[in-house]
Amino acid sequence: MDLTLSDRHRALQAGLRDFIARHGHRSPPVGGGGGRVRPDRRVLDWQALLIEHGLAARAVPRQYGGYGADPDVLDAAIITEAFNRAGLSPGIQGQGIRMLVPTLLEVGTEAQRRRWIGPTIRGETIWCQGYSEPESGSDLASLRTHARVEDGHFVINGQKIWTSSAHYADMMFLLCRTEPEAPKHEGISYILLSMDTPGIEVRPLPTMTGHATFNEVFFTEARVPVENVVLGRGKGWQVANVTLKHERMLLGDASKLMHRVHRLRALLERVEVDGVALIRRPQWRERFLRLQGEALAMKYHQMRLLGEAAKGEEPGLGVLIVKYVGTVLAWKLTALAVDALGDAGLPYEPHDDVGEDDEATGWYADHMYDLGLIIGGGSSNIQKNIIAERGLGMPREPRVGTS
């Protein structure tokens, strides 16, 4: 990849400096991952401003509500770096924007794109993901939630679990079995449904952060129009893998890692022991520099992946490692911050909205939330198996009870 900046890229940098100087004060707070809440007016206004200036939804076509720029890896890197250094929010980064929108752009119908992409990128429609079930997590294709077709509707029955944001989401993208006679990977459909649909019950699941960010969701004769299926009946596994590709990039997002690096360095420069800043103490500086190096490696690795995707190339093994490496590294970064804070954040009290104005609580909330993300979206052990078997071509582990 050629990282040489053109005149256009330098103009983008200049425009970003002007934008930050004029509008940076309008950014919502960043950090404090323990509380996941519906975007408030300040967040929605900031998102609208970013889209207007091409700093969010930049490559989403204008006919779907985006800015309409051509995809450019360096554009994205320049914007991310400027926002990270300024400590500004990159805008809404949830499952709808980072997972569903690119899925619909790739495999959705024109009607689905026009109906859902605009409200989603503006933060008006919030999505949750209906994948995992109590007996179908690591082996997702064994899911049991099922639907029959009746009078032009899917009639859905079953249960989902670990459903992030379901307690305030407007919509869900759901995997369920619609072709009971087909092999398990071929009998699944990917369906879009309103969380206001009669027959849906959401039960929050409190976590160690003190928040109920996950949920159980139950379906009892919930009726959804058949046109809400993406790509067609029985094509859900194919669509799900498109979404999972984007989910791995979201959970292991290098831009989040680099933002943490900038925050962490500022913290180590402020915290002193016996009048000496921690960043000037060799043991702390070495630990920070190692993590900074790993984060930079992830940054350029993801730039390479985005460059390959823009050229239509298959990323292969490269994309498989992002979720595993990124979530573990995010937790290591917060662990260093927690160690640096010492007892400052030990009396942790969860809040609904924690930002950098409550730094100790924010770091501790992120630390506990990130520990959960090492498991969420496919646990590290499962990710290692995927990397070994699909990426490196290694033989599958022997199954207990089989010969």
Image: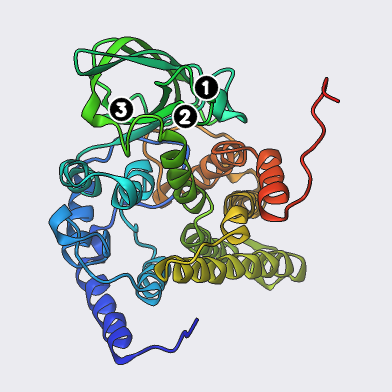
Q: Is 272 on the left-hand or right-hand side of 67?
A: right
Q: Residue furthest bottom?
A: 7
Instruction: Decide which of tag 1 and tag 3 comes sooner along the chain.
Output: 1
Please report the residue visible at 19 percent of the width from the left and 40 percent of the height from the top.
124
Q: Determine which quarter of the picture holds residue 171.
A: top left
Going 71% across and 39% down the picture, which residue do you hit? 381
386 to the left or right of 100: right
Label placed on residue 143: 1
Image position, residue 56 (x, y; %): 27, 60
Mark 3 Cα within 10 Å, few/some/many (few <14, many 20+)? some
Q: Amino acid at mark 3?
A: Tyr
Secondary structure of the residue carrying tag 2 is loop
Q: Name the foreground residue: 107 vs 378.
A: 107
Comes first in the chain, label 1 or label 2 = 2
Vertical arrangement, residue 377 with respect to residue 22, above or below: above
Q: Secondary structure at mark 3?
A: loop
Quadrant the C terminus occupies: top right
Mark 3 to mark 2: distance in Å? Answer: 17 Å
Q: Is residue 316 left or right of residue 120?
A: right
Label 3, on which residue?
Answer: 168
Residue topped by disc 2: 131
The spot of residue 224 in percent (x, y) is 24, 20
* Mark 1 neighbour density, 10 Å: few (under 14) some (14–19) many (20 or more): many
Residue 364 locus on image (x, y percent): 56, 42
Q: How many marks?
A: 3
Residue type, numbered disc 1: Leu
Query: Cα distance, mark 1 to mark 3?
Result: 24 Å
Report the mark closest to the observer, 1 or 3.
Answer: 1
